[in-house]
Amino acid sequence: MEKSTDTLQARQIMLTRGAFLWNHILRAPFWAVYNLLLFILYKDLHASPFQIGLFIALKPGVSLLSMYWGHLVNQRPDRLISNIIWASVIGYFPFFFFPFFYSSWFVLFGSAIYMMMHRGVVPAWMEILKLNLPKGTKEKVFSYGSILSYIIGALLPLVVGPILDHYVLAWRWFFVLTAFFGISAIFFIRKIPIPFVSKGKQKEHHLGQHLLHPWKSSISILSKRPDFRNYQIGFMLFGGCGLMIMQPALPKFFVDVLALSYTELSVALLICKGAGFVLTSPLWARGMSRFNIFRFGGFVTTLGGLFPLVLLCGPLHIFFIYLAYFTYGVMQAGSELVWHLAGPHFAHDQDSAPYSNLSIFAVGIRGLVIPQIGSFLIFYFPSTALLIAAAFLCLAGTLWMRRAYKQHLSPSLLN
C-alpha cells in the first residue's frame, strides 16, 4: 500500500511538473510576439496616442478584473484545472481572428482579454503547485519554467523581427500560429491530478455579493494576517512603487543623459538583463526554500534599489549600464519567484488562491496610479531625481522587510 501511494505521488509530481513546464514553453512564442504589439500598433496599424496609452495601461488595469476570475477557485479545488483551461481558450481565442480584423481596436480588445486571463490563472496555478509538489520542489519547477520562457522570449524576436521588416502583415499569422501553440498546452494541463478535497457547502451569492466578495476577502486577509500585510507593504508598495515610478524617466535618461545607441540599449536589455535572470534563477529557487520570506523579499528590494544607483554611474562608462541591467535581471528572477509563490507560502495549509488574488489586486492598483505619478513628476524634475527616488523607495522596502522579519519571527514563518 505504501509503495502504491509513493507511486501515485511520484506520478502526481511528474504530471504537474510536466504540465507547468510545457505550459511555459508553449506560451513563450506567443508572449514574444505579444511584446512586439506596441510597435505593431504604432508602425503598422497607425494607432492614435490615446490607443497607445490605453494599450500600456491594459496590463495593470485588467488585473482588477483578473481577480474575479481568480476568485472563482477560492475554496474550490474542483475548479482549478477547468479555470486554467477555460482561461487559455478565452485568452487566445481573439488572436485567431487577427488576419480578418485589421483594426487597432480589435487588437486592444484581444490584448485586454488575454492579459485578464493571463493574470487571472495565477491563483489556480499557485494552488496546484502547493497541493501537488513537495516543499522545495515548487520553487525549482517555477524557476525552470521561467528560465525556459525567458530564453525563448528573448531569442524569438531576433528571428521574427527581420521577417516582419520584409513582410509587414506577417504578424497577423504569427499570432495565429503562436496562439495555437499556447492553447495546445491544455492537453498537458487536463492530465494534472488534483487531490480530493471536500468542497463543503457552497454559499449562494447574488450579483452584488459576487462583485464585492473578492474585495471583502482581500480586506479580511490584510486585517487578520499582519505578516502578509507587512509583506505587501514592503515588497508590493515600497519595492514595487520604486521600480514603477522610474519607468517614465528611463527613456529621457537614456537619450538626454547617456545618449545610448540602439545597439547599446539592446545589449543591456536583451543580453545583460537576460543573463542575470537566467543565471541566477536556480539560486533564487534554492534560496526561497531556505530563507525566511521577509529576508528573501528584502534581498529583492535591495537589488531593486541598486539598479537605479548603478545606472546613475552610466555617464562614467558603458560598463555600469550593462552592470545595472544585469542587476535588474537578477532582481527580476527573485521578484517573479516571490511574487507568484508568496500566496502558497503565507497560506500554509489553507487555500492560497485568496492570497494570490490579493497580490494581483495590488499590482492592478499600483500599475494604474504610480506610472502616472512618475509621468507627472518628470515634467518638473530631472530624470536623475526620479532614479534616486526609486532607489530610496526600494531600500525603504528593504528596511520594512527587515523590521517585519524581526516582528514576525516564529517557527511557522521560517519555512
Image (cartoon, rainbow, N blue to C red):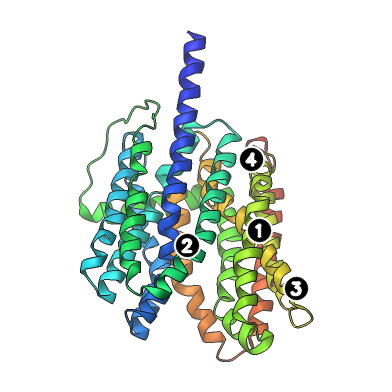
Badge 3, how many Cα within 10 Å: few under 14, some, many 20+? Answer: some
Q: From mark 3 to mark 1, how far is it between C-alphas?
A: 15 Å
The type of residue carrying mark 4 is Leu
Residue at (35%, 68%) from the top-left corner? 171
Left or right, 24 with reference to 208: right
- Of pointers 2 and 4, the one earlier in the residue sequence: 2
The type of residue carrying mark 3 is Phe
Query: Residue 68 at what x, y percent from top left?
Result: 32, 54
Residue at (51%, 52%) from the top-left corner? 149
Quarter of the rendering containing residue 402: bottom right
Q: From mark 1 to mark 4, how far is it between C-alphas?
A: 32 Å
Left or right, 365 with reference to 205: right
Query: Residue 363 at what x, y percent from top left?
Result: 47, 62
Badge 1, how many Cα within 10 Å: few under 14, some, many 20+? Answer: many
Q: Is residue 61 above or below residue 387?
A: above
Badge 4, how many Cα within 10 Å: few under 14, some, many 20+? Answer: some
State the SS at label 2.
Answer: helix
- Of pointers 1 and 4, the one earlier in the residue sequence: 1
Q: From mark 2 to mark 4, how far is it between C-alphas?
A: 24 Å
Query: Residue 29 at what x, y percent from top left?
Result: 43, 56
Q: Is residue 57 above or below residue 347?
A: below
- The circle drawn on residue 320 is 3
Whether residue 81 can be seen here:
yes
- Of pointers 2 and 1, the one earlier in the residue sequence: 1
Q: Which residue in the structure is indicated by mark 2?
A: 363
- The circle drawn on residue 275 is 1
- Of pointers 2 and 3, the one earlier in the residue sequence: 3
Badge 2, how many Cα within 10 Å: few under 14, some, many 20+? Answer: many
Query: Residue 339 at what x, y percent from top left?
Result: 54, 53
Left or right, 148 with reference to 256: left
State the SS at label 4.
Answer: helix
